[in-house]
């Protein structure tokens, strides 16, 4: 998985920085990856398109940490959302329904 880096958006730059601190390198797409076209392998030469290379699990961890840090967000374990609108009906692990 990759994310385009080098944008002027502050949020994207912060996300890329957080991923970098977790060991996800930024690299030129063509130089860092192997791309097979019908005519053969693309040359591994820089093209000026930088991406952040990462595993999905790392991205999910970073996003979960960011969401958890938000004041109005609360995680409720052992529940799952049955409906998103107009209001959630939540089920406990034991099968009891909890209304919000």
Image: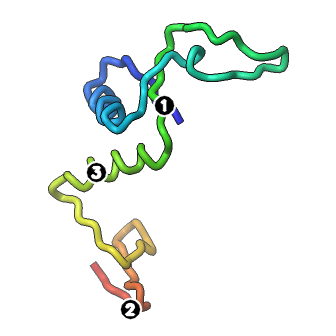
Mark 3 lies on a secondary structure that is helix
Report the label total: 3
Q: Percent x, y for residue 64?
A: 33, 52
Residue at (57% x, 14% y) in the render: 31
**Tag of residue 53:** 1
| Left or right: 38, with 72 as reference point | right
* In this rendering, the label closer to the viewer, 3 or 2: 3
Q: Earlier in the sequence, mark 3 or mark 1?
A: 1
Query: Counting residues from the N terminus, which is met first, the one under dot 3 or under dot 2?
Result: 3
Classify 10 Å Cα crowding around label 1: few (below 14), some (14-19), many (20 and above): many
Label placed on residue 96: 2
**Disc 3 versus disc 1: distance between alpha carbons?**
19 Å
**Above/below status of 82 relative to 53:** below
Mark 3 near mark 2, Cβ–Cβ under 8 Å?
Answer: no
Tell me the mark number nearer the camera, choosing from 1 and 2.
1
Mark 3: few/some/many CA within 10 Å (<14, 14-19, 20+)? few
Residue 82 lies, with reference to residue 72, above or below; the image says: below
Q: Earlier in the sequence, mark 1 or mark 2?
A: 1
Where residue 45 sits: x, y (%)?
60, 7
The residue shown at (38%, 35%) is: 23
Which of the pair 49/25 is nearer the observer?
A: 25
Dividing the image into 4 quarters, which one contains the C terminus? Answer: bottom left
Question: In the rendered image of this protein, does residue 76 appear above or below residue 69?
Answer: below
Give the quadrant of residue 37.
top right
Which quadrant of the view contains residue 73? Answer: bottom left
Q: Secondary structure at mark 1?
A: strand
Colouring: rainbow
Residue 91, how many percent across, how many down? 40, 83
């Amino acid at each position: 998985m990759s994310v385009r880096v080098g944008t002027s958006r502050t949020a994207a730059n912060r996300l890329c920085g957080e991923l970098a601190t977790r060991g996800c390198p930024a690299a030129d797409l063509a130089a860092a990856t192997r791309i097979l076209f019908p005519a053969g392998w693309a040359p591994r030469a820089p093209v000026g398109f930088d991406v952040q290379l990462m595993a999905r699990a790392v991205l999910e961890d970073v996003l979960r940490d960011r969401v958890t840090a938000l004041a109005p967000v609360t995680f409720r374990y052992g529940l799952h959302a049955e409906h998103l609108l107009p209001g959630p009906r939540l089920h406990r692990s034991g099968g009891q329904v909890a209304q919000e």
